Image (tube, helix red, strand yellow):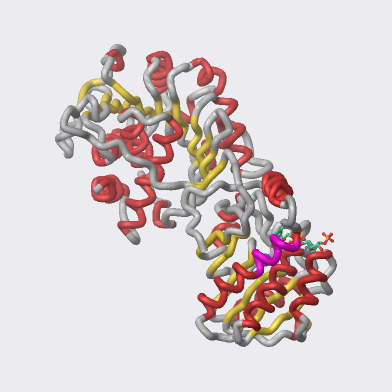
Amino acid sequence: MIPIDGLPVLTAAEMHAAEQAAMVGEVTEATLMDRAGSAIAQAVARLAAGREILVLCGPGNNGGDGYIAAAALKRQGLAVRVAASDAPRSTGACRAAAIWGGAVEALDRAEPAPVFVDAIFGTGLSRSPSDEIQNALARLAEAAWLRIAVDLPTGVAMDNGKALGKVPRFDVTLALGAVKPSHLLQPAASLMGQVRLLDIGVATRSHARTLTRWHLPEPDANSHKYSRGMVAVIAGSMSGASELTALAALRAGAGYVLHLASAGVSGSAAPHAVVRRDYTADALDEDRIGAVVIGPGLGRDADASARLEAALSGGRPLIIDGDALRLVELGTLAKHKAPKILTPHGGEFTHLFGEVTDDKLSATRRAARQSGAVVVHKGADTVIAAPDGQAILCPEASPWLSTAGTGDVLAGAIGAMLAAGLEPLAAAEAGVWLHAQAARRLGKAFIADDLADALSAVRG
Ligand SMILES: NC(=O)C1=CN([C@@H]2O[C@H](COP(=O)(O)OP(=O)(O)OC[C@H]3O[C@@H](n4cnc5c(N)ncnc54)[C@H](OP(=O)(O)O)[C@@H]3O)[C@@H](O)[C@H]2O)[C@@H](O)CC1
Ligand SMILES: [K+]
């Protein structure tokens, strides 16, 4: 059972190609199913800790994996029963059911067991499971002590994070051969419990992967405040939000943070380490600025538009967040040649790029290509994509992040990473990673100021 940080994420088409490529020489579909079945049995035996196991099998190869696993668990002397939603239909499932060879209960009459293994449908799900299957799953899951899904929970589509019908909550999902988009995308991801990969010898390659800890830039003996990274935060009518961004940039490790607000707006609030200056037309002429953040608390008036225009024509690496995402036009963005990162939440994304009609991974990749920017499409399933198609899917950090100001903190953390010299995609990933770690460290009911402060501790 392998933790999934930093692993490739394969879509249905990519997974199919990877499986085909793996089936060479003596390796057949049956070999892969045997490997999957024995890896599942090993994981289930460990998790069940001697409790009785009920394996639910469907008609296809997901069911086939279930029969092979049940046979292996029985050989180990564990108490295991099998119930089926349907007779085996695929060649693989028929062979696997013969290997099991024991009793098979009807799904709707199956007695619950403390450990419940769902191998009804996996990547071959083509429509919503019948009410009988949904009800049986709900009844057996409710009565179980531990719920384990094989590859994907029954009812979850593979690529778009959608649940087709009622899907119970699982404790563990064992991804076979590769992580798939729905293991990370919502609402499916929230039904999976812990996702772990089982290696079945399929070589996986993809331009998408899961979030991982990035090498955060560290100062050395020759470092000074400018080499650590200078971040300029352009403020607007609500300077509280941009102050949070500035604080976060400092706490994430920037050497120098400049807060630029209209005369009279920028006060002398703490922290005093933030350098506060009045915004002027030549404010961004300072060569040492490594990243400009614009958007948090910017407002949407004429001043805000003028500042955005100046930031876009200034040619410095740019992070566009909040109000600036409502003001910016796609055509203008493509003209800004320096690196840029957009950090829209769902509403801002729709405003700029239109409704997501397929799935969040494809939509974010399209948006990155269209805008020529790295796009951090925020949410409980943040997706980061670069114009060249590389993408990073992020597990949910904490539901407590849904509070005012946490986006301003993220923009500051990414600003610090960009100013320190990371490439835009790496800067976005590092910022999202830091932000998620800080949220996890804080637990519940934290406020955005705590989150910004916690970035320092996470760096430690
Ligand atoms: N390929 C490989 O190399 C390896 C694959 N592996 C395993 O195979 C799994 C994929 O197997 P799979 O393609 O057979 O699909 P699966 O999820 O079992 O379902 C297909 C069956 O269900 C049926 N069906 C679908 N939806 C339905 C519904 N709502 N209600 C009712 N029926 C429905 C569908 O029938 P149809 O849609 O044609 O009517 C068909 O009979 C994958 O998740 C992994 O576990 C591993 O062994 C490692 C090697
Ligand atoms: K399943």
Task: Tell me the residue at 73%/52% (across/down).
Answer: 23
Using the image, determine if residue 112 lies above or below residue 353: below
- Asked if the stretch drawn in magenta spans residue 53, the answer is no
Q: Is residue 290 left or right of residue 141?
A: left
Where is residue 179 shown, x and y percent of the image?
A: 58, 53
- The residue furthest front is 25
Where is residue 242 shown, x and y percent of the image?
A: 31, 34
Using the image, determine if residue 195 lies above or below residue 141: above
Q: Is residue 171 left or right of residue 261?
A: right
| Number of numbered discs overlaid on the protein picture | 0
Using the image, determine if residue 152 lies above or below residue 230: below
Task: Tell me the residue at 72%/65% (across/down).
Answer: 62
Task: Tell me the residue at 47%/52% (across/down).
Answer: 5
The residue nearer to you, when weighing 200 against 348, is: 200
Q: Is residue 80 left or right of residue 322?
A: right
Q: Ligand 1 is in which quadrant of the figure? A: bottom right
Q: Quadrant of residue 79?
A: bottom right
Q: Is residue 240 visible?
A: no
Most common SS among magenta residues: helix
Q: Which residues make up the magenta segment?
A: 30-37
The residue nearer to you, when weighing 267 against 73, is: 73
Where is residue 6 shown, x and y percent of the image?
A: 48, 48
Task: Tell me the residue at 63%/40% (across/down).
Answer: 356
Q: Quadrant of residue 366?
A: top right
Q: Is residue 137 visible?
A: yes
Where is residue 4 shown, x and y percent of the image?
A: 50, 55
